[in-house]
Amino acid sequence: MKALRWHGKKDIRYDDAPDPEIEDAGDAILKVSSCAICGSDLHLFDGFMPGMKHGDIMGHEFMGEIVEVGKETRKLKVGDRVVVPFTITCGQCDQCRRGNFSVCERTNRNKNLADKMFGHTTAGLFGYTHLTGGYPGGQAEYVRVPYADTTHVKVPSTLSDEQVLFLGDIFPTGWQAAVQCDIEPTDTVAIWGAGPVGQMTIRSAVLLGAKQVICIDRVPERLQMAAAGGAIPINFDEESVLDRLGELTQGKGPEKCIDAVGLEAHVTRSLDSMVDRAKQAVMAESDRPHVLREMIYVCRPGGTLSIPGVYGGLVDKIPFGASMNKGLTWKMGQTHVAKWTDDLLRLIEEGKIDPSFVITHTMSLKDGPGMYETFRDKKDGCVKVVLKP
């Protein structure tokens, strides 16, 4: 089969790869109909996440049709149309029973590596480094889905791929980011980042009843999309984020702040952002935490910081004293996809949201290597790329 494979920093290739096979009785084989490039894929493309190996198949946002099932797979049959969550879940361990699917205790087949890196294992993730199991990803013609009975979302034929594809990652990620803010009708929610996750977070915050939603970015097309979703845009290249947030909140600051950017944050007019880049270049820190710092400073005392943006390692110069003395609550983590998909699928079916709004580019899988650069550099108005094998 053909797949997009990682061969080093900024080196993704459309290559031949071995066809996946049933390896465990609980597996299924999926023929991919649509997949997408995610912002967190860029952390692999840019070489900021450890644990990648030459030839690893990329991608964790994909869907398609089941073409083979293992003998102990009970809930799926050949011909079923499914979205596959990026988190692989067993459904039986203590964390899964609690709904904490992204920290499933069984599915990371490289548990020892994760224990050393993070203190405890995370769930296995598709296409996302050997720290999270080294599972081949979904930017391919076919994918093996382990723990298939608990790692799928069945979707109806009445909805297009484009409407349901993002149930595997960015829609539940944006939703969880907003839900963990415990949004009240009097809240101002400020969201850093107008990329795909930021866009889903905006619409989730609106659906959850926030009084005011604000989005901070610098890319005009993304800010226009944010405004169309109900957010007040702030272009940090053109105005002071701190001053504008002060104006919009009568000097009190937003009650809820969401980091939809993660470890590659950059702000062109920020000295600490330039220092972060220098530290990252010499490996003095692995992640750039400018957004975290800014959220701590602007968040209203007693407020909440929600962090769906991916971080991979170490950050420096976090004003933790300010966070503690302001009484801020931090909530973060990879998305517990299966916790939200039933409700989100219902919202799509009821017409309350159509996640396909975020798609700006639909290309063939073979065009994927070039689209990584287009997506990363935000060329051609690119917000979200869907690939068709």
Image (cartoon, rainbow, N blue to C red):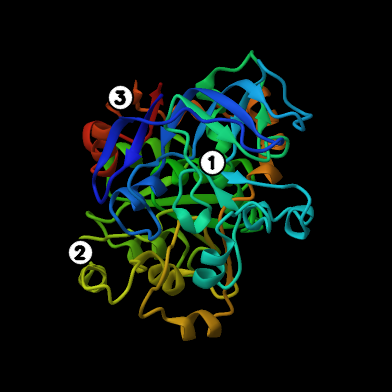
- Badge 3: how crowded within 10 Å, few (<14), some, or many (20+)? some
- Above or below, 383 against 330 in this view is above
Name the image quarter holding residue 377. Answer: top left
The mark tally for this picture is 3
Question: In x, y percent, where is residue 249?
Answer: 47, 62
**Residue identifier under label 1:** 169
Q: Secondary structure at mark 2?
A: loop
**Residue identifier under label 3:** 366
Question: In x, y percent, where is residue 114?
Answer: 54, 64
**Residue identifier under label 2:** 269
Question: In x, y percent, where is residue 387?
Answer: 39, 26
Q: CA distance from mark 3 to mark 2?
A: 37 Å
Closer mark to the observer between disc 2 and disc 1: 1
Which residue is found at the position 35% from the left and 27% from the top? 360
- What type is the residue that disc 1 sits on? Asp
Quick one: 105 or 311, which is closer to the camera? 105
Q: Secondary structure at mark 1?
A: loop
Q: CA distance from mark 1 to mark 3?
A: 22 Å
